[in-house]
Amino acid sequence: MLIINLIQEYYLILKHKVVGFHKPIPEYYQIGEKGDIIMIIGINGIWTSLKTIADYFNKHGYRIHFPVFKTRDPINKIVDNISEYIDNRNLNNFSIISHSKGGLISRILLEKYNDRIINVINISTPHKGSIFGYFQKISLNEIKPKSELLKQINKFKTDKIINIYPKFDNLVIPKSSLKLDNARNIKLDIVGHTRILESKELLKEIDKIL
């Protein structure tokens, strides 16, 4: 079963790469009356990796925002890009849904915009780093365990964070990095760093929160 799940995992990654390059972010995502949700993808991610979540909440009345940035850029540079997006649109009382490296970005944004953010939902985030952070060639050195940036981020408040993660994550190793101290932690009975993003269980949990 684990092998089948992992095959599905890497199939989804490939599918998002192919579809995402040819499918623009829908303009109708900007229509909604319930509020604003900022979506933050992870490294090497494509916006379509969060499409299932975005579609669901847009249909339920939320305006969906996908700030554009280069996912391999340093985390603080991406924070600056998204901050500019937030300020230019004067967003207030918004939520953030983020995946993987995007979760680390969202934690810095929460520190910066705490009074304007309702809550942050992090999915499969390597809060204490991952062994893949040692692979310098793919620009992940910031998320190697005990990096200076992670030490700084882990001093920030976590009271508005809902931290959701799968029972087995093939990209966040060690698995203890998936948990976040003093946040609301939710473990789902799912295998896969990407598979979790298209699960009904995840949508149910986010729906309860929003």
Image (cartoon, rainbow, N blue to C red):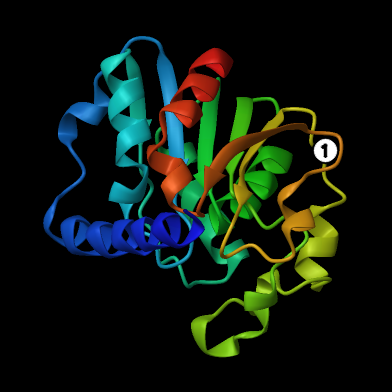
Amino acid at dot 1: Lys
Q: Residue at x 32, y 13 (%)?
A: 61
Nearer to us in this view, 190 or 42:
190
How many labels, in total? 1
**Where residue 128 sits in the image (x, y, percent)?**
78, 60
Q: Position of residue 133 (x, y in %)?
A: 65, 77
Position of 83 compared to 61: left or right?
right
- Residue 166 visible here: yes
Is 137 placed left or right of 48 in the picture? right
The residue labelled by disc 1 is 157
Furthest-left residue in view? 22
- The relative height of residue 90 versus residue 152 in the rendered view (above or below) is above
- Examine the image and state in which quarter residue 63 appears: top left
Q: What residue appears at the point 43 percent right and 24 percent down from the top-left corner?
A: 36
Q: Residue furthest bottom?
A: 137
x and y percentages locating residue 165 in the rendered image: 62, 43
Which quadrant of the structure image shows residue 34? top left
Identity of the residue drawn at 43% across and 42% down: 197
